[in-house]
Amino acid sequence: MLQLRAALMARVRRFFAERGVVEVDTPLLSRAGTTDPALESFATRYVGPGAAQGLTLYLQTSPEFFMKRLLASGSGPIYQLAHVFRNGEFGRRHNPEFMMLEWYRPGADYHVLMGEVEALIAYVLEGLVDYAPARRVSYRHWFEEATGLDPWESDVAELIGFAEANIGVVPESLAASQASAWLDLLVTHWIEPRMQSQPLFVYDYPQSQAALARLRQHPLPVAERFELYISGIEIANGFQELGDASQQRARFEADNRMRVVSGQQAVPMDEKLLAALDAGLPDSSGVAVGFDRLVMLAAEASEIRSAMPFPLDAI
């Protein structure tokens, strides 16, 4: 497994070197955590010169914010293989520490980036497993195919009715939730388990699931976002990046309000990222790929722990 991981990392680096994409190295610690209510940052405390009273620092859940600051400073296309950390995530496909491959393409739109994601995966997996070309489908069509419901038009009662009829017991905590939470439940508990092995790009998500993606209003209000699934496993998550500082601030603030309502702790927003966006982020697309999940595919492993030297239960 060590040899396989090393070989795949070498292939990743060759892929980007051939395309003139620069490898960067950003900090693991930040003064800002992730505000996303679906993610939980690990926090630690620095005490020493410069912070005699102590300074709370957060382990990165993604290198995205630092990389966007580099983009705003004129770095051009960049990539990184980084260790990232997400509290509370452990299971067959999750580990609280894992490796993420992330890259950004100034001047490229997210449909072009989908093609590069596919080229990278075919390159990395060549000679190890067969990789069939990915199908591309909009989130709306994908959801309708699987459930018969329109994620833009169906109300919460319809989503709940489908969940109760087809999934069975659903979490009580979702009872008063908005449609976005029920869409997520149906994706994770109904659609993903029934996906075929053929790779699939799903793109143009509901605006409520924009995360850090740019919004588009016509012909349908969507978030310009995509995900790549292979055999029902999410491999990549990409965006046409939001470059508007005021919109990003509003999303961070809304995230923190949601965190407080759900009993989570609000976390500091990344003011330096917001300043970089205000100074000017080039029109860019970006994507994160779960490197350990790529190793799983290459090794035909069913659990992420088999793709890691030291998963949580081995440290």
Image (tube, rainbow, N blue to C red):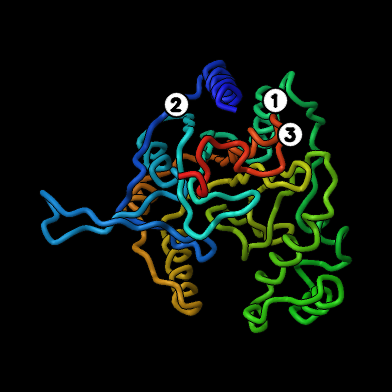
C-alpha separation, residue under disc 1 versus residue under disc 3: 11 Å
182 shown above or below 299: below
The first of marks 2 and 3 along the sequence is 2
C-beta proximity under 8 Å, tags 1 and 2: no
Q: Which residue is mark 1?
A: 125
- Reply above or below: 274 against 299: below
- Identify the residue under disc 3: 300
* Residue nearest the viewer, comparing 44 with 33: 44
Classify mark 2: residues with Cα within 10 Å, few (<14), some (14-19) or many (20+). some
Q: Nearer the viewer, mark 1 or mark 3?
A: 3
Identify the residue at image location x=58%, y=20%.
7
Marking on residue 94: none
> Which label belongs to residue 23?
2
Horizontal and vertical percent position of residue 49:
10, 49
In front of the other: 75 or 270: 270
Circle 3 residues within 10 Å: few <14, some 14–19, many ≥20 = some
